[in-house]
Amino acid sequence: MTVSTAPVVGTRTAREALDAAVAHLRGRQDPAGWWKGDLDTNVTMDAEDLLLRHVLGLSDPARTAGAARWIRSQQRADGTWATFHGGPGDLSTTVEAWVALRLAGDPADAPAMRRAAAFVRGQGGVERTRVFTRIWLALVGLWSWDDLPAMPPELIGLPTWFPLNVSDWACWARQTVVPLTVVATLRPATPVAFGIDELRVPQPPARRAPLLSWSGFFERLDVALHAYGRAARRGPLAAVRRGAMRRAAEWILARQEADGGWGGIQPPWVYSVMALVLLGYPRDHPAVAAALAGLDGFTLVTDSDEGPVIRLEACQSPVWDTCLAVNALLDAGVAPDDPAVVAGATWLLDEQVTADGDWQVRRPTLPSGGWAFEFANDVYPDTDDTAEVVLALRRTAHPDPARLRAAVERGVEWMAGMASADGGWGAFDADNVKTLVTKLPFCDFGEVIDPPSADVTAHVVEALAAEGRDCTAGVRWLLDHQEADGSWFGRWGANHLYGTGGVVPALVAAGVDPSSGPVRRAVRWLHEHQNDDGGWGEDLRSYRDPAWIGRGASTPSQTAWALLALLAAGDRGPVAERGVAWLVDHQRPDGGWDEDQFTGTGFPGDFYIAYHLYRVVFPVSALGRWVHA
């Protein structure tokens, strides 16, 4: 059967939309070869940046005013702040935003501030916020360190075979927890000139959890650790504690990256620089100076009628954006030796990580060779980026083919060697699956381990299959983890649309028959969840409420994910045609797309991301595969 390369929508066909999108994507490439879209999260990044600068004595009136403009602009009519566009008000986010605006000079009795405070009280008060929010309150004298969970720095000395050692944590968590143990031990407080009575609600007496439960055990362990902490402030135990903090500082310094940060993400960055300053490192120390300067590189400034608006990116994604952009151009039919493709590939070759990293704790004999997410993150390459880079490089006609082939082979060896024992892949570590750390009292926000996920495993399987490598165990893992409804859960993207959009192409690439039961169930699920307008969308509330799975306003990136799965399964029928028509019909005149919704995931249920380039690269790939099937 012959299928046209898309119905005409308005005056533009799919081919014309693809050409416009390719031109748009070309125009966003940096002269150095990379792509990087802005990255939106929520205002806790900006609130905590203002609080950090207050704690370190680095507050700047102009920056404070600019950040406050951004925070105010993100408040909704009901007075709340959310963790994603269109989401429900979030208690901890609203508290942090309220405190930051009070620090910036907003009066507590301003109407917007009163609405925020009323929401906080209605949610049970500041007392119900997450531990990390209360840590920030303690840092500015608005909460007692005694009322926070103990975080002993002696954790750094636990051997790798002992429960709760730092290697049991995911890389982002361990890099956050280690400096936090120093901060929580030294208990700094730089008071602000206001209180938070407006946010408080009288609380009933706390009830202890049953002794024979993990909550009860760690509750009582926390009491013991607080007692130990008091004893360690003086006497023989003080030397033990000083030694632990010294080892923590050495651990922190050993993992600082070339851009001055830690892991390329905000949480470990801010706690690490704070820990070093508290330990006596002066602000002109090279490590501290580099860290503070690096944070400025994560700052985005835009103009408004009221003055500059300043916001802070939680992370930057140039490697990820670049490999996705190169793959998209190649999907669109751009020549493998096109200058844009070659420039992107050359930049990616320069970014390959050949240094040692924490992943070697569980894979000590595996040679390095992966890629990271950020401009600078040599300690923590990840399998997800590595898979997509391999898929991009192997399709590129590079002027130095021997160099490219050597990089691909080294990346494949590292990626394959990072498989977990169950046959799947996590992002940064192998076999990072011990759940005991999730029971600790201060682990009430975000994922703290890095088990295999369907989306990461799918990308690795697809790359291995493309290279002719055995990926049987990965395929089996994916088939075993298909949901009952036919979809796959998406760990790093929203949500079942992302998982399904990645897994189906991987299975087909690995040799699974498109007419097989698992693939047909996935296709049926996609058919059933197409919106009436022809697109697809999934609200981030699906991580908390199953009723939202596969449901939400249509978005360019999520529509493209669904199409990529359908096309891989050989489905070019009316459902796919309507999806293509949605992309064509919603394209801007400049070749891009608008996407207010967040479709990226940091921590399922807690922290979400809007990647500005997702709304371009994935539609380009989907339209390209439709037009050039």
Image (tube, rainbow, N blue to C red):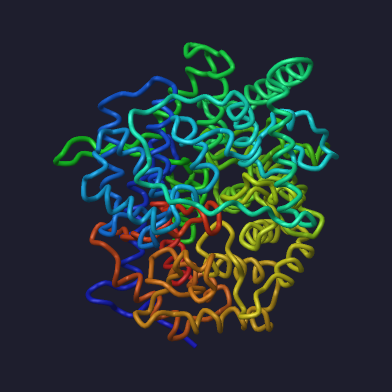
The residue most toward the left is 305
Q: How many numbered dots are placed on residues in this image?
A: 0
The residue drawn where x is 55% and y is 49% is: 396
The residue drawn where x is 23% and y is 61% is: 589
Q: Nearer the viewer, residue 286 or 238?
A: 238
Q: Give the quadrant of residue 227.
A: top right
Asked whether residue 171 appears in the rendered view, the answer is: yes
Side of 138 where 14 appears, left or right: left
Side of 148 where 52 appears, left or right: left
Side of 19 where 243 appears, left or right: right
The residue drawn where x is 45% and y is 26% is: 294
Above or below for 448 versus 235: below
Q: Residue 8 location in percent, x, y?
A: 29, 78
Above or below for 238 versus 98: above
Side of 574 where 275 appears, left or right: right
Asked whether residue 350 appears in the rendered view, the answer is: no
The residue most toward the right is 161
Q: Residue 430 location in percent, x, y?
A: 75, 48
Q: Residue 388 location in percent, x, y?
A: 58, 52
The residue drawn where x is 62% and y is 83% is: 520
